[in-house]
Amino acid sequence: MTRGTLITFVTAVLMLVGAQAEARTCKGDASGWGVASVEIDSDMNGILGSSGYSEGTDKCLGRFTASNAGEIADWDGVSYCDFDEYGTPSGATLFYLSISQVVRYRSGDLVFLELDDSRPSWYCYHWADPNTSTYEVNSVITGGTGRLEGISGRSSGTGRSYGLQNMSASSGIFVSEVDLPDRPKKQDD
């Protein structure tokens, strides 16, 4: 396998208290699916992309859906993962090159995320049993709409992929640390 399946689900969360914003750390869970090697080359570099969809719940804002697209590098031939007691690897590590994600909450507010280049994001493809493949995706929150306008922060998701050739199901957990700038109180005229 030369491409991993892009399975991501990260989300941004915050809690507003009156007119003041509050920095929050929130946890949640998500499940969904991903498609590898879709016929998209979003940055025209010759590497075909992947896309995915997930649904989940975060502990601060509730239910959400998320759509993503991105690219995973070809296997470099030297990065392995999940070793047995004899030191034999059971999988190949594939690294994410890019990820863009849009998270939509029930309120209709959107949050936008991109790959966090300062932290590695990877997919461990288990060649003996693709149903045990694992991943970690680290993202930067780049903005939002509605009451989430001005949101910033970071998110990290880990989980398991259940491989089915070029399409995979996934499940996992995430942690997000976010900040929203203070908003001025509205004055009555």
Image: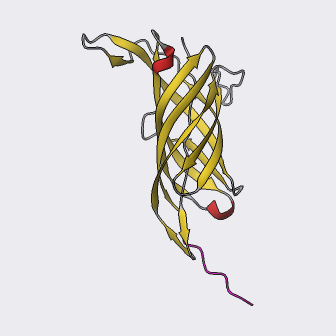
Which residue does the image show at 50% across and 46% down from the upper left?
28
Based on the picture, tell me whether residue 188 belongs to the magenta stretch: yes
Whether 140 is drawn above or below 185: the answer is above
Q: Is residue 150 left or right of residue 23?
A: right
Residue at position x 62%, y 60% in the image: 148
Does 143 appear above or below 15? above
Is residue 100 placed above or below 48 in the rendered structure? Answer: below
Which is more toward the observer, 23 or 169? 169
**Residues in magenta, as a range:** 180-189
**Quadrant in which the C terminus appears:** bottom right
Residue at 54% in and 55% down: 13
Residue occupying image coordinates x 31% and y 10%: 88
Give the camera-side residue of 25 and 76. 25
Residue 4 visible, this orientation? no
The percent coordinates of residue 36 (x first, y second) are: 63, 21
> Quadrant of the image for the N terminus?
top right
Query: Looking at the image, which is closer to me, 7 or 180?
Result: 7
Across and down, in percent, residue 11 comes to: 56, 47
Residue 99 placement (x, y as % from top left): 58, 36
In the image, 161: left or right of 118? right
